[in-house]
Amino acid sequence: MTATQFAPAAMPNASAEQRAVDRVAEAAHRLNEAVQRAIAAGYSVELVRTSRHHDGAGNWGDQIVPTVRPNGAGKSA
């Protein structure tokens, strides 16, 4: 048998902007999965905006905190 030669795969050269968008998308995906797992475990989850971050150049983003309640707890307004 001949030995297989392995070489590093070329990684895409994403821009800093694309990497930032990809990080937010991945974090949102993980958050959605975590919310689904919490619901399956008997919890209610509400994501509440706690602040809005501005960079001074017209860009902004909402920042959130989760509110988690066990099954049967009162609903929020």
Image: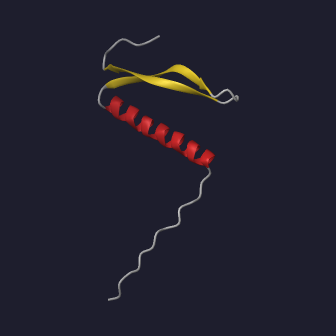
What colouring style does the render use?
secondary structure
> 76 above or below 40?
above
- Who's the residue at 53% across and 66% down the image? 10
Q: Where is residue 40 in the image (x, y as percent from the top left)?
A: 32, 32
Left or right placement of residue 60 versus residue 28 in this view: right
Q: In which quarter of the image is the N terminus?
A: bottom left
Residue nearest the viewer, comparing 76 with 65: 65
Quadrant of the image occupied by residue 39: top left
Residue at (66, 30) in percent of width and height: 59
Q: Report how many numbered discs are placed on residues in the image.
A: 0
Picture quadrant where residue 75 is located:
top left
Q: Which residue lies furthest to the front in this view?
A: 56
Q: Which of 69 and 18 is in front in this view?
A: 18
Question: Residue placed at 52% from the left, 43% from the top?
Answer: 23
Who is closer to the viewer here, 71 or 4?
Answer: 4
Q: Looking at the image, is 71 positioned above or below residue 7? A: above
Q: What residue is at 58 percent from the left and 43 percent from the top? A: 21
Res. 37 image quadrant: top left
Q: Residue furthest right?
A: 58
Q: In this view, does 49 lie to the left or right of 33?
A: right
Q: Where is residue 38 in the image (x, y as percent from the top left)?
A: 34, 30
Percent from the top left, x then y, of residue 53? 58, 25
Q: Position of residue 58 (x, y in %)?
A: 70, 28
Furthest residue to the bottom?
1
User: Residue 43, relative to residue 20: is it above or below?
Assistant: above
Please give left or right for residue 44 compared with residue 63 in the image: left
